[in-house]
Image (tube, grey):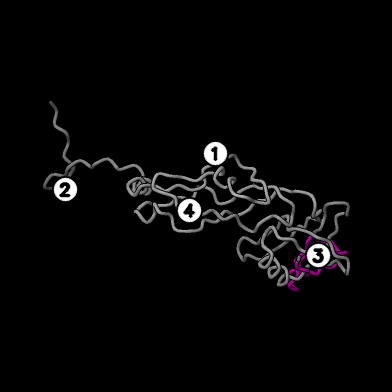
Amino acid sequence: MSVILKANLRNDRQKSSLHKLRNTGNIPAVVYGGKMESKPVYIDSGEFIKTIREVGRNGIISLDLEGDQTDVMLSDYQQDSIKGDILHADFLAVNMNEERNATVRLTLVGEAAGVKDGGVMQQAVHELSISATPVNIPQAIELDVSNLQVNENLTVADLKSTRMNYTINDEDSLVLVTILPPKQEEEINSGEQQEEAPPENEEGRETEPSES
């Protein structure tokens, strides 16, 4: 069941009106898509944040626009780079029976056997592109790494071997996580070794190479 988020039509599009909305705890937004015309609206900032925390970034929201409810997803948003406040939001009206693309977080679960043996886990991919009907888009995709040994990796093909209600769009060969040997991890962290400095003489000056 989708969560209801109330919205109100926004008739005044002047910049001064936008500032007033934000100063009173609201977020200017737009809802569009499907057969409906693009509509400028505004929503309560606190209710918006509460809703997204509950349903997730790709969750279904029942947008109640003055009594008329429409199933939507958060398509995009703008955020203040300093304060972190949401400045604007875009909602996409969705058909619950049609597939759409979405970007979903990849979460690793379990403790890898290779890590227990001293290896270091390196996650190469943190998000995946999928296609699914809106109700089947997960908040996150879990990848069990419990059996992963040192020098082994898991790819998208390993994920596709499990049963799921969505299609992963990324290539099967894409490496998601690898267990590196301890020595290899140290080399990556330290980078290229610096060349050994020439020896110093008793006065602290570098010793010049002697001519043959």
Q: Which of marks 4 and 2 precedes in the sequence?
A: 4
Distance, label 3 to label 1, CA atoms, is 39 Å
Q: Residues within 10 Å of mark 4 (few under 14, many from 20)?
A: many
**Residue 100 placed where, x, y %?**
74, 48
Nearer the observer, disc 2 or disc 3?
3
Q: Which of marks 3 and 2 precedes in the sequence?
A: 3
Tag count in the figure?
Answer: 4
**Residue 184 placed where, x, y %?**
35, 45
**Residue 136 placed where, x, y %?**
70, 55
Distance, label 1 to label 2, CA atoms, is 55 Å
Nearer the observer, disc 3 or disc 4?
4
- Callout 1, which amino acid? Ser
Q: Which mark is residue 63?
A: 3
Which residue is labeled 2 in the image?
204
Nearer the observer, disc 1 or disc 2?
1
- Callout 2, which amino acid? Gly
Q: Which of marks 1 and 4 precedes in the sequence?
A: 4
Viewer-closest of 24 and 185: 185
Q: Say which element carries label 3.
A: strand
Distance, label 2 to label 3, CA atoms, is 75 Å
- Callout 4, which amino acid? Val
Q: Which residues are magenta?
A: 3-29
